[in-house]
């Protein structure tokens, strides 16, 4: 049984699961699917194309599946998918996709803090923490368990690796590789995210391997040779393989 405020609007074509709370002044458009046990506090807007899982909380002013801020968007039917157990705080805006990818995706167990923006066709992983007023431009990809501090500006098409910590106020147009701390101006490699890795259960041995791999890669005059050396030295490390593959797949280049 859903609890829908009489001061909320739910389009008759929207599909709601069970035990959802829809607060006053919420607006739920057509072509919206919402799962179970979600809490929409007052003044939350869910636009067409939203696909929302279970156990999410949306704070006042959140606007989900908004029209993309992309001049190439021509009104095509696209989606905004949000997983489970997310906390989406006040005034967060998440755009739906464009014809480029068709879908903007947010994983599960994420905390998106007040006033941050997720643009069209972004793909966000699981377990993310993204700080107040951070802005992600179109088609940004973020892997699992990344932490992005407040007031960060991320250029379109950037990739951010898993388990990173990006310091507050950074702005960047290059990819951020996994397991590291990124900061300063211009944004660059500032060592490993030691606190985050230990909190996530990485052993000291694994952390040492990751550290040595980065030392090899960044010390190499030719990136390809550094990646080859790191793989040769640690052939059985899935973390080193993830790092090397991230560098090889980068189209924008990786911070140094």
Image: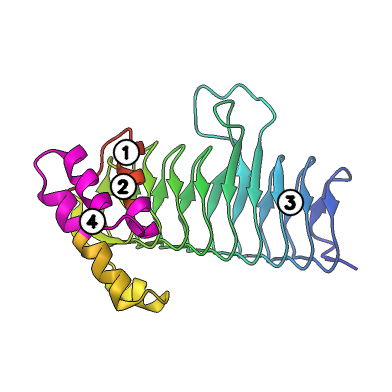
Instruction: Give the residue number, with chain letter if any, for mark 2.
Output: 244
Q: Is residue 218 left or right of residue 174?
A: left
Residue segment shown in magenta = 213-242
**Residue nearest the viewer, comparing 183 with 24:** 183
First along the sequence among labels 2 and 3: 3
Q: Residue at x 55, y 47 (%)?
A: 94
Q: Is residue 27 above or below residue 39?
A: above
Foreground label between 4 and 1: 4
Q: Secondary structure at mark 3?
A: strand
Please name the residue that numbered disc 1 is placed on.
248
Position of 67 with respect to 208 (left or right) is right
How far separated are the C-alphas under marks 4 and 1?
Answer: 18 Å
Q: Earlier in the sequence, mark 2 or mark 4?
A: 4
- For residue 236, which quarter of the picture? bottom left
Q: Are marks 1 and 2 in contact (CB under 8 Å)?
A: yes
Q: Is residue 46 left or right of residue 100?
A: right
Cα–Cα gap, marks 3 and 1: 44 Å
What is the spatial separation of the Cα atoms under label 2 and label 3, in whole angstroms? 45 Å
Task: State whether residue 98 is above or below residue 27.
Answer: above
Query: Which comes before the other along the chain, label 4 or label 1?
Result: 4
Q: Position of residue 195 (x, y in %)?
A: 31, 76
Disc 3 vs disc 4: which is toward the camera?
A: 4
């Amino acid at each position: 049984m859903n609890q829908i405020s009489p001061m909320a609007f739910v389009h008759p074509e929207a599909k709601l699961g069970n035990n959802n709370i829809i607060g006053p002044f919420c607006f739920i458009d057509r072509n919206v699917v919402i799962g179970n046990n979600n809490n929409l506090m007052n003044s939350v807007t869910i636009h067409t194309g939203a696909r929302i899982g279970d156990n999410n909380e949306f704070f006042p002013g959140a606007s989900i599946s908004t029209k993309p801020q992309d001049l190439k968007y021509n009104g095509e039917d696209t989606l905004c998918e949000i997983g489970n157990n997310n906390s989406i705080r006040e005034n967060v805006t998440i755009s739906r996709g464009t014809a480029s990818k068709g879908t903007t995706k947010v994983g599960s167990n994420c905390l998106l803090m007040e006033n941050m923006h997720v643009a069209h066709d972004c793909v966000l992983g699981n377990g993310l923490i993204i700080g107040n007023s951070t802005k992600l431009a179109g088609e940004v990809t973020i892997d699992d368990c990344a932490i992005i501090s407040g007031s960060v500006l991320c250029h379109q098409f950037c990739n951010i690796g898993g388990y990173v910590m990006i310091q507050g106020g950074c702005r960047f147009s290059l990819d951020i590789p996994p397991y590291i701390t990124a900061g300063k101006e211009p944004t660059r490699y500032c060592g490993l995210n030691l606190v985050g890795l230990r909190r996530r259960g990485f052993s000291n041995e694994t952390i040492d391997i990751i550290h040595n791999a980065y030392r090899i890669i960044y010390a190499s005059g030719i990136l390809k040779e550094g990646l080859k050396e790191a793989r040769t030295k640690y052939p059985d490390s899935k973390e080193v393989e993830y790092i090397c593959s991230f560098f090889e797949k980068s189209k924008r280049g990786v911070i140094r």
